Image (tube, rainbow, N blue to C red):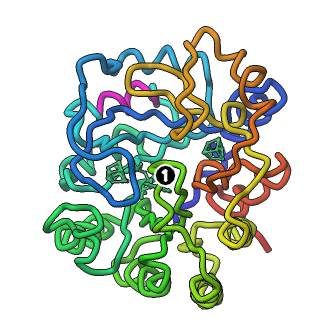
Amino acid sequence: MRKVRFTDSLRIIARGSLNWPAGRPIVVSFEVTDSCSCYCKHCDHGGPRDDSRLLKPADYRRYMEALKPCVVQVSGGEPLLRDDVVEIVRAIKNGSTVPYTILVSNWSHMTEEKYLALHDAGIDQFSVSLDFPDDRHDAFRSYPGLYSQLETLVPRLARHGFDDIVLNSCITSENVGEIGRLADKARAWGVNLCYSSYSARRTGCRDYSLTTPEQLGVLNTELDRVEARRDDTNWLVNAPSTIASMRQFFENGKMPGCRAGHRFLVVTSEGWLQPCSMVFKKWRLEDRAKIAEEFTNTNTCDECYVSIRSYLDKSFPQLLWENVSGFLSVKSS
Ligand SMILES: C[S@@+](CC[C@H](N)C(=O)[O-])C[C@H]1O[C@@H](n2cnc3c(N)ncnc32)[C@H](O)[C@@H]1O
Ligand code: SF4
Ligand code: SF4
């Protein structure tokens, strides 16, 4: 995975050092639409939604000025369904290298032209969901032809050489045996890989949770094999401590200590602040200081270990070290 230039790393770290003691979020996820092109088995989005009150690209500047995050996710629903997604990214970046900005998408509507326009607008990382290393992906996402589209497009766009594409594989009971083959696919396509953990909180469905000793055994064996393939190119984007915590999350079925609403938050497509994408309490931007007091400080929810949490359940020194030695430009020994 491409490392951020040293001067840009320092800018991101400087902003984080101000946000951490000030209680401002480190990561903000903008869900730019609730509509989606897929109907995934593990998700509560799916299909079209009322998009009549969406924030406009220019509105995102106001959120950026107030929240000043170090890292932004542009997500949804499916963000590429918005025709103005490039303008949204430009408004978020405002010509600067900070924040580090990740587009989280299923790539149903990705093209070479859009990829290059988004890269120019300032996307640092393209996170592409992939649940299976073959066309079982289409069935899981209810989108015929999606896998073959990815199979053509991902390696082709990787050849531009920006090293900014990361496959994002959410581990469920259905694909736990595919962890190694998903890694093979990332290597064959010349891109990076990040695992995340299924949470039943979104849909209430426990069918995709890992509940049996057999499933947990497969998880640990597959993760051991993938971890043995880790090298200093950072193609396996999850930090070792994150993989260890994912194992714990699946083993215990929970992960306490969530800082949603404090270290990270979601801005909904209509501009409400939410602690995370699975807790539907809402605050206005002007009332952001109340979220920690009214939600985070008494939150006992422990039902997920999604990526945004897994980055931020750490102390600031640990977070800095992992990022400095991982994404950012100083190499670990
Ligand atoms: C909600 S989607 C939004 C962006 C885009 N539509 C996509 O699929 O990449 C973001 C990520 O959440 C993951 N996801 C969906 N349902 C989940 C669940 N119940 N638990 C954990 N992750 C989930 C998806 O696999 C995807 O990688
Ligand atoms: S995981 Fe992404 S693609 Fe699938 S339904 Fe949810 S938002 Fe849509
Ligand atoms: S554990 Fe935290 S991030 Fe996850 S669903 Fe609960 S409140 Fe949201």
Q: Which quarter of the figure has residue 259?
A: top right
x, y percentage for residue 189? Answer: 34, 78
| Residue that badge 1 annotates | 204
Q: Which residue lies furthest to the top in this view?
A: 286
Tell me: 201 left or right of 178.
Answer: right
x, y percentage for residue 29? Answer: 51, 37
Q: In this view, does 22 lie above or below 137?
A: above
Q: Residues within 10 Å of mark 1 (few under 14, many from 20)?
A: few
Residue at x-position 29% and y-position 67%? 140
Magenta part of the protein: which range?
Answer: 86-92
Q: Is residue 56 above or below residue 133?
A: above
Q: Is residue 97 above or below residue 329?
A: above
Closer to us: 232 or 176? 176
Residue at x-position 38% and y-position 61%? 129
Closer to us: 310 or 249? 249
- Amino acid type, callout 1: Gly
- Ligand 1 quadrant assignment: bottom left
Q: In this view, does 262 lie above or below 47?
A: above
Mark 1 CB lies closer than 8 A to ligand 1: no
